Image (spheres, rainbow, N blue to C red):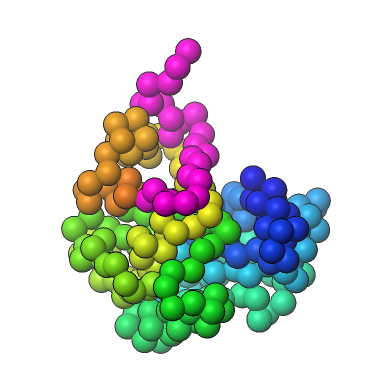
């Protein structure tokens, strides 16, 4: 799906913009992209890579979402350095969020919302996505593109893009795997929960598509048609 969307976007607009997430499930996709024949299947010179969120850590920190993507595939594909738009977590969440928002506005040449061709998201066992957590004031943001986040349950501060940016994307791909995600997947997909209790359920592109790619374990509690 990633490759198809990349090719379609490059064919129609001569560029492909994607925002990535971290976590164990996206790692599998990234690892594939960094190997034959996939690494040569995209015109990487026309691809621009962004992030949906990042921890406030240096780029080489083990918890860095940038490091995950770089180590698994960005270092293996012929993408120009200028086409990699990372969140500079080492600058601290407030400064990094402002810098990232400025980068988004400059690249997309907008005053309003950017439209990514694709945003890849994961989902936490608590229902968070990107770094949008239940109870966070960031869920109510309507004008900012990126915000600093200080999660109560996590000791690491972060930067996240906001719901308006997510919901303006052309395509959203949610990735989930493992038994630990079964309850939350059933809550968001099966029960359609869209309250702030499950921020992932608030992702609903206004003019785009939303797809879930889940394995058998993550789908275990869904009531699927036979």
Q: Is residue 5 visible?
A: yes
Left or right: where 140 falls relative to 71 = left
Q: Position of residue 50 (x, y in %)?
A: 54, 69
Q: Position of residue 226 (x, y in %)?
A: 48, 13
Q: Nearer the viewer, residue 30 or 203?
A: 203
The quarter of the picture where residue 130 lies is bottom left
**Does the magenta stretch mainly form a helix, a strand or a loop?**
loop
In the rendered image, the residue lying farthest to the top is 226
Q: Position of residue 187 (x, y in %)?
A: 30, 35
Q: Which residues are magenta?
A: 203-226
Q: Nearer the viewer, residue 182 or 111?
A: 111
Residue 10 position (above or below residue 223): below
Residue 80 position (above or below residue 192): below
Identified at 65% across, 76% down, the residue is 83
Identified at 32% across, 50% down, the residue is 202
Identified at 29% across, 31% down, the residue is 191
Residue 13 inside the magenta-drawn segment? no
Q: Quadrant of the N terminus?
A: top right
Residue 224 inside the magenta-drawn segment? yes
Number of numbered discs: 0
The quarter of the picture where residue 158 lies is bottom left
Identified at 38% across, 79% down, the residue is 97
Q: Is residue 123 visible?
A: no
The quarter of the picture where residue 85 lies is bottom right
Q: Nearer the viewer, residue 26 or 100?
A: 100
């Amino acid at each position: 799906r990633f490759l198809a969307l990349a090719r379609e976007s490059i064919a129609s607009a001569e560029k492909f913009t994607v925002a990535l997430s971290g976590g164990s499930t996206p790692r599998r996709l990234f690892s594939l992209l960094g190997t034959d024949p996939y690494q040569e299947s995209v015109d990487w010179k026309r691809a621009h890579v962004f992030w949906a969120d990042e921890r406030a850590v240096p780029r080489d920190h083990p918890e860095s979402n940038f490091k995950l993507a770089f180590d698994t595939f960005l270092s293996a594909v012929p993408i120009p350095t200028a086409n990699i738009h990372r969140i500079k977590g080492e600058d601290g969440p407030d400064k990094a969020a402002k810098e990232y928002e400025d980068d988004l506005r400059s690249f997309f040449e907008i005053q309003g919302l950017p439209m990514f061709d694709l945003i890849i998201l994961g989902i936490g066992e608590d229902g968070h996505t990107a770094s949008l957590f239940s109870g966070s004031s960031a869920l109510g943001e309507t004008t900012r593109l990126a915000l600093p986040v200080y999660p109560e349950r996590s000791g690491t501060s972060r930067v996240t893009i906001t719901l308006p940016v997510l919901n303006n994307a052309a395509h959203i791909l949610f990735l989930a795997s493992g038994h630990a995600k079964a309850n939350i997947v059933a809550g968001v997909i099966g029960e359609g929960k869209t309250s702030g209790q499950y921020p992932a359920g608030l992702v609903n592109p206004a003019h785009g598509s939303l797809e879930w790619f889940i394995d058998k374990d993550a789908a275990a509690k869904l009531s699927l048609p036979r």
